[in-house]
Amino acid sequence: MSAHMSDRMSSRAQRIEVITRGERRRRWSLEEKQAIVAESLAPHASIMAVARKHGIGTGQLYGWRHQLLGDRRNEVPSFARVELTHQPRRLAGPDAAASTSPFGLIEIVLPGGPSVRVDAQVDEHALRRVLAVLRG
């Protein structure tokens, strides 16, 4: 090699950067995962906001949801039995006076006896939560 080449090579300082990780990988308990997943399932919840709040990625949150909720694509949809009547049943108590018009009124009678009456303005998410509790 010529002197010119060796001078040029020796004059360059190679930079080496060593990255050490001071913190260990975070371990989440099952209860913590369940709480975070439940928070992400709330109506109008943003997956990104929930993930950012807890310092995790959205992919990790979706993974936890899949892990804890299972694969719901394999669930077989089912139909509920519906009976049509000409006269709506009368409720007893203070709720009977609140319903002035039977139009748009839906009564859902679940196996075992519980029933729910809603009108056309019912909040879908709230109704789903109520039905899930009554079925449970």
Image (cartoon, rainbow, N blue to C red):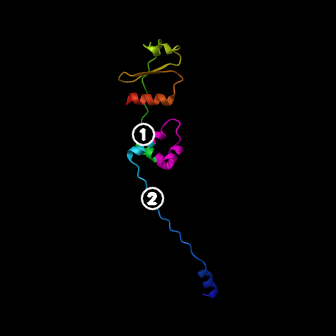
Instruction: Identify which residue, 17 or 65, lies in the foreground.
Output: 17
Residue displayed at 43% across by 53% down: 26
**13 relative to 105, above or below:** below
What amino acid is found at the position of numbered circle 2 in the picture?
Glu
The kind of secondary structure the magenta stretch mainly shows is: helix
Residue stretch rendered in magenta on the structure:
37-62
Residue displayed at 46% across by 14% down: 96
* Residue beneath disc 2: 23
Helix or strand or loop: what does disc 2 sit on? loop
Q: Position of residue 67 (x, y in %)?
A: 41, 45
Of tags 1 and 2, the one toward the viewer is 2
Q: Residue furthest bottom?
A: 2
What amino acid is found at the position of numbered circle 1 in the picture?
Asn
Q: Would you say residue 131 is visible in this rendering? A: yes
Q: Position of residue 15 (x, y in %)?
A: 56, 72
* Residue beneath disc 1: 74
Quadrant of the rendered structure where residue 9 is? bottom right
Q: Position of residue 129 (x, y in %)?
A: 45, 31
Q: Residue furthest front?
A: 22
Residue displayed at 50% across by 65% down: 19
Q: How packed is label 2: few (under 14 Cα within 10 Å), some, or many (20 or more)? A: few
Report the side of 48 relative to 115 (left or right): right
**44 relative to 26, above or below:** above
